[in-house]
């Protein structure tokens, strides 16, 4: 099982809704059927989902989850009794979690959690589409992954997705469309090689294509060197913090030109694995505290590795879609005086979940603590305020900041 994770599963409307929202967080860059776009709740704007983290302060006061933390013993006991009675252990455990009022804890079937673990490994099964709700509830293709089944079929951004396997998807939640594209009614990962029939429209042309799902790899870190006022800089765009994301960020920093500034773009990042957030922070710090968190009353400290680049100018872009583990990373760099944060206040998801296996093989992801930044600031329900407020002009403002730092832009 993965270690501490801080994704954003909302309270379930049905058995598997939370896992779907977790996947929306994990793969926000990519696909319905592997790639999609949605917001913290589908009814909000078509922003994106994100994930959670750890915390700090030498002696942080006790923290509790909204509605109080879930009693893990009660969850396990409910599952055991249900199994003994020939009923669903995961359903009984979900009922206990629901009554607790903790919106971040969730219970998954074994199949659902297997898909969750695959997502944390940076892989998913799908066709390579990113979808969003447009005007009038229209489902629109936002992005098509190069080399994917969707790309090979000639589908392009801006096309309208009308039907999936003959069912009209107009007005449906993005998460529902994702489940249909992934091909598993339990909302878990689909199987490679299974077909999905899409009804599409481009202008006045309407057509259908049948695609075969494939196992795709999430591109969670994208690096480029955009030109602009003052010259190039290295821009590192971060999506979900899945396995390997931290190492990719560290490689990008080491490969940057000498003296060149780094623009770390965490906008819309749902977070992911705490270990990857710490690894990413280590690219810019020479040891020291990244965050602290309380784990069932015991304080734990997350520390960066030694040897990071502490001299290169660094600006971090954040917004309301920057969540959990991504907030941990941003807060650490801000509190340690290593970076200037530009953008808008982050989402404010600072609780820590740990998984435990239940009697019937299902998995409970329960809140066990909350994290704080190195200066002792709580994040949950509050978020992190940027040093420089910016909206659509965030990158332009970032270049101005770089000029003030005397760095590569």
Image: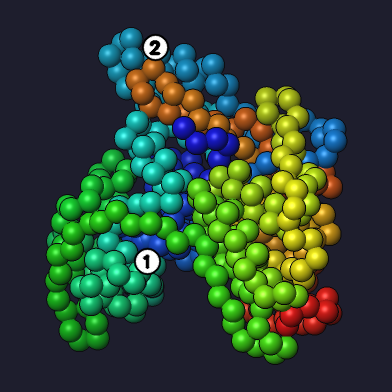
Which one is earlier in the sequence, the residue at label 2 or at label 1?
2
Residue closer to the observer: 379 or 295: 295
Up-down relation of residue 364 to residue 352 (above or below): above
Residue closer to the observer: 105 or 355: 355
Give the residue at x 84% y 47%. Answer: 375
How crowded is the residue under tag 2: few (<14 C-alpha within 10 Å), some, or many (20+)?
Answer: some
Q: Which of the 4 quarters of the picture holds residue 60?
A: top right
Give the residue at x 73% y 88%. Answer: 230
In the rendered structure, the answer to whether residue 309 lies left or right of residue 51 reads: right
Disc ID at residue 130? 1
Disc ID at residue 81? 2
Question: How many marks can you see?
Answer: 2
In the rendered structure, the answer to whether residue 358 lies left or right of residue 295 reads: left
Give the residue at x 58% y 26%. Answer: 70
The answer to whether residue 17 is visible is no
Quarter containing the C terminus:
bottom right
Residue 72 rendering spot, x and y as whole percentages: 55, 21
In the rendered structure, the answer to whether residue 104 lies left or right of residue 260 reads: left
Q: Which of the 4 quarters of the picture holds residue 257?
A: bottom right
The answer to whether residue 27 is visible is yes
In the rendered structure, the answer to whether residue 149 lies left or right of residue 34 reads: left
Residue 46 rendering spot, x and y as whole percentages: 47, 66
**How is colour applied across the structure in the image?**
rainbow
Q: Residue furthest bottom?
A: 229
């Amino acid at each position: 099982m993965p270690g501490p994770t801080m994704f954003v599963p909302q309270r379930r409307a049905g058995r598997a809704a939370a896992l779907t929202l977790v996947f929306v967080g994990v793969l926000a860059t990519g696909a319905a059927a592997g790639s999609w776009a949605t917001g913290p709740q589908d009814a909000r704007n078509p922003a994106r989902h994100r994930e959670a983290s750890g915390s700090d302060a030498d002696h942080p006061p006790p923290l509790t989850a909204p509605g109080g933390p879930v009693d893990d013993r009660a969850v396990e006991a409910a599952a055991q009794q249900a199994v003994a009675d020939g009923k669903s252990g995961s359903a009984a455990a979900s009922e206990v979690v629901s009554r607790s009022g903790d919106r971040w804890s969730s219970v998954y079937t074994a199949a659902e959690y297997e898909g969750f673990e695959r997502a944390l490994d940076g892989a998913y099964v799908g066709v390579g589409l990113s979808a969003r709700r447009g005007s009038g509830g229209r489902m629109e293709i936002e992005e098509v992954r190069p080399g994917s089944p969707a790309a090979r079929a000639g589908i392009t951004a801006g096309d309208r997705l009308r039907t999936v396997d003959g069912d009209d998807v107009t007005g449906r939640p993005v998460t529902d469309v994702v489940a249909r594209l992934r091909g598993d009614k339990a909302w878990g990962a689909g199987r490679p090689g299974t077909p999905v029939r899409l009804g599409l429209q481009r202008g006045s042309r309407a057509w259908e294509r049948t695609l075969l799902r494939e196992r795709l790899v999430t591109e969670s870190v994208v690096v480029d060197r955009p030109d602009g006022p003052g010259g190039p800089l290295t821009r590192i765009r971060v999506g979900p913090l899945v396995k390997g994301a931290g190492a990719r960020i560290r490689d990008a920093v080491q490969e940057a030109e000498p003296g060149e500034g780094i623009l770390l773009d965490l906008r819309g990042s749902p977070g992911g694995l705490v270990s990857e957030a710490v690894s990413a922070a280590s690219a810019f710090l020479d040891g020291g505290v990244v965050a602290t968190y309380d784990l069932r009353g015991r304080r734990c400290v997350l520390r960066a590795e030694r040897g990071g680049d502490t001299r290169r100018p660094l600006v971090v872009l954040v917004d309301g879609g920057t969540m959990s583990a991504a907030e941990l990373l941003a807060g650490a760099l801000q509190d340690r005086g290593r970076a200037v944060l530009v953008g808008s206040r982050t989402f404010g998801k600072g609780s820590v979940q740990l998984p435990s296996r239940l009697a019937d093989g299902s998995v409970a992801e329960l809140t066990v603590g909350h994290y704080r930044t190195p200066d002792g600031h709580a994040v949950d329900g509050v978020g992190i305020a940027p040093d420089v407020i910016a909206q659509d002009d965030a990158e332009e403002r970032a270049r101005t900041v770089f000029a003030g730092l005397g760095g590569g832009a």
